[in-house]
Image (cartoon, rainbow, N blue to C red):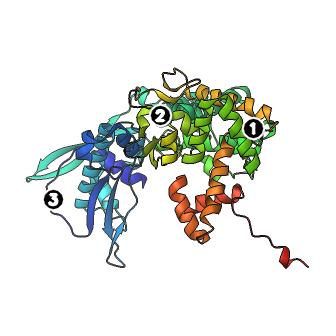
Amino acid sequence: MSKLLVLLQNVHDIVHDLPMKSNYSGPHIYTGNINIKAWSKLSKLEQEEALSKEWYVYYSFRNPLTGKLVRQSNIKTGVNSLKTKQERYEKLTQIKDSLLFLLKKGFNPYADNSVLEKNTLQKLDTEINRSTTATIIPTKKNSETTPIIKTKKTTPESKKEKTIKEAFQFGLKIKQNVLGATSYSGFQGRINRFLHWLDQNGNSSDKISTLDKKTFINYLNYVLENTSASNRNNTRTDLSSIVQTLVDNEIMTDNYLKSINVLKSAPERNKTYSITQETDILKYVQDNDPVLLLYIQFITYNFLRPVEVNRLKIGDLDLEGKKLFVRAKNKAVKVKIIPQKIINLLPDLSNMNPEHFLFTPNAIGAEWEAEENNRRDNFSKKFKVVKDHFNLNKDYGLYSFRHTAITNLYREIRKTKTPHEAKSVLMGITGHQTIEALEKYLRDIDAELPDDYSHLLK
């Protein structure tokens, strides 16, 4: 695949008028399942959702054994690290044109392309190792355009290899453009702690090529010894993510983290409230904190995560269409139904600023200049007062209301439907992406329990 990428990168500016062959179709550009020509007509939320998806070039080639067109691997070349539509589409258009040129010249993913490589790229292996810089220029011979290679010596600057610290700082800049502020904050913290540890046990000023698998293993063992298996696994995930970015940008050659095992850990999960607990808590909150009560009701009736409620703005509620636009953790924006029960509880929002947050410390729909972590902590502290009043331990929290609501709804649906039918209905309400994910969630919160089996005991 690396040779194909080098070919693509070196021929994107060449246009050839060659006859089409019937052994391939495409290439085409996939842009998140939207019409790129109608981009300006999309809402900001729709544009964000489109950019949250993977964009790529795809094509099919006829399998010589079956004679059928077979979809080949998608070609991305780091394009999804670009944050704007224009940047992505221009890059993908270059890739598409370059791939079309190669296909017309006879590139065959099922065959040996050495002749094509020889005619198209001179000294290909040294180009892959980046010891030379190759530029393709067209020359005319007998009215036929033939690409040739103009090779120039690399400058001392182009030979300079990044240090570990420089490489990881480069990776952080890219990640900052693709992660949300809260996610990036935690991600950056883990990466910086790794660099700090490296300075204490090595040197982050060493060349990036000196970074090996053993170094990562030693650091993950250090994290495990000083924290937990869960934190060690999360650290492994973040390190693997940034290293993969460096591999995609040809700064590193291998992602060693992929071959390092994930340790078994017991995730902490808030317990479900009993009927009595939920009734008593809601009565207490109704008497003492109306804003917190509506906050909890959004978790309960819309099956939202607390962090999703924190992100809601007035403009995210379409009361006429009964739609709620949620900035979720698993994709940029998702649309949920607003049940009439919630609409009946809301004050008049028609004259409120669409950019104001729905929930603020003391009012519904007001300006609130605070980072997402601080907004989350505000409501956690509010609920801590409630927990202290009822002597609830760390096993209970705001998240418990979501678990409780989903458990109650699932058991109600199960009264008239089979388990599979109930899960199909429930998945559309909770927002889980797959039945498998929903089933795992239901198992974790013990939503499905067997009927009383006393009659089976002897």
Q: Are marks 1 and 2 in contact (CB under 8 Å)?
A: no
- Mark 2 lies on residue: 174
Q: Position of residue 348 (x, y in %)?
A: 44, 32
User: Which amino acid type is marked by label 2?
Assistant: Ile
- Looking at the image, can residue 8 be seen? yes
Answer above or below: position of 343 versus 349. below
> Circle 3: is it few (<14), some (14-19), or many (20+) Cα within 10 Å?
few
Q: CA distance from mark 3 to mark 1?
A: 58 Å
The structure residue drawn at horizontal position 73% and vertical position 26%, both measured from the top left corner, is: 200
Q: Residue at x 69, y 45 (%)?
A: 400
Q: Identify the secondary structure beneath mark 3.
A: loop
Q: Residue furthest left?
A: 143
> Identity of the amino acid at label 3?
Leu
Q: Which residue is mark 1?
A: 223
Give 290 or 401, whichever is nearer the viewer. Answer: 290
Q: Residues within 10 Å of mark 2 (few under 14, many from 20)?
A: some
Split into 4 quadrants, where in the image is the N terminus? bottom left
Left or right of 385? Residue 2 is left
Kindly tell me whether residue 105 is visible in this rendering: no
Q: Nearer the viewer, residue 438 or 309?
A: 309
